[in-house]
Amino acid sequence: MTADPGSGGEPGEGERKFVRACALADVPAEGALGVEVEGTPVAVVRAEGELYALHDVCSHAEVTLSEGEVYDHTIECWLHGSCFDVRTGAPTGPPATVPVPVYPVKTEDGDVYVALS
């Protein structure tokens, strides 16, 4: 989901602090890119033309989600097949039962920005 560019790109602007995560061109057309934002692993996901950002660690086995497959607003963990909805972080397939955090995301001037708080 691409946030409104006026939603606080600079510290002190609104409640959220958006931090540059990557170049938009680096995010696969239907896939994920693993990045680190202020020390936090984040998966920047493009699914069906929209951008999403979620915690890049599977809640089941603590492996990198960005290395998994993306389809139908779902990211699938490559190790055990746990699936998560990229819009909500909710698990949609076992063995995971705990959601992963999702983060607000926006694009500006060809870059992707994520707000961790």
Image (cartoon, grey):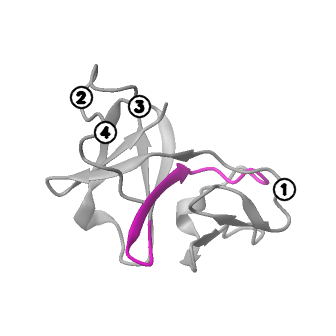
Residue appearing at x 28%, y 19% in the figure: 12
The Cα atoms of the two marked residues, 2 and 3, are separated by 15 Å
Disc with the residue nearer the chain's start (1 vs 4): 4
Region of the chain picked out in magenta, as a range: 46-61
Viewport quadrant of the N terminus: bottom left
Eye-nearest disc, 4 or 3: 4
Residue appearing at x 36%, y 57% in the figure: 2
Q: Which mark is residue 38?
A: 3
Q: Which mark is residue 79?
A: none
Q: Position of residue 3 (x, y in %)?
A: 35, 51
Q: Position of residue 110 (x, y in %)?
A: 17, 58
The Cα atoms of the two marked residues, 1 and 4, are separated by 32 Å
The Cα atoms of the two marked residues, 4 and 3, are separated by 19 Å
Disc with the residue nearer the chain's start (2 vs 3): 2
Q: Secondary structure at mark 2?
A: loop
What residue is pinned by disc 2? 10
Q: Nearer the viewer, residue 55 or 14?
A: 14
Disc with the residue nearer the chain's start (3 vs 1): 3
Side of 50 where 82 appears, left or right? right
Q: Amino acid at mark 3?
A: Glu
What residue is pinned by disc 4? 7
Q: Secondary structure at mark 1?
A: loop
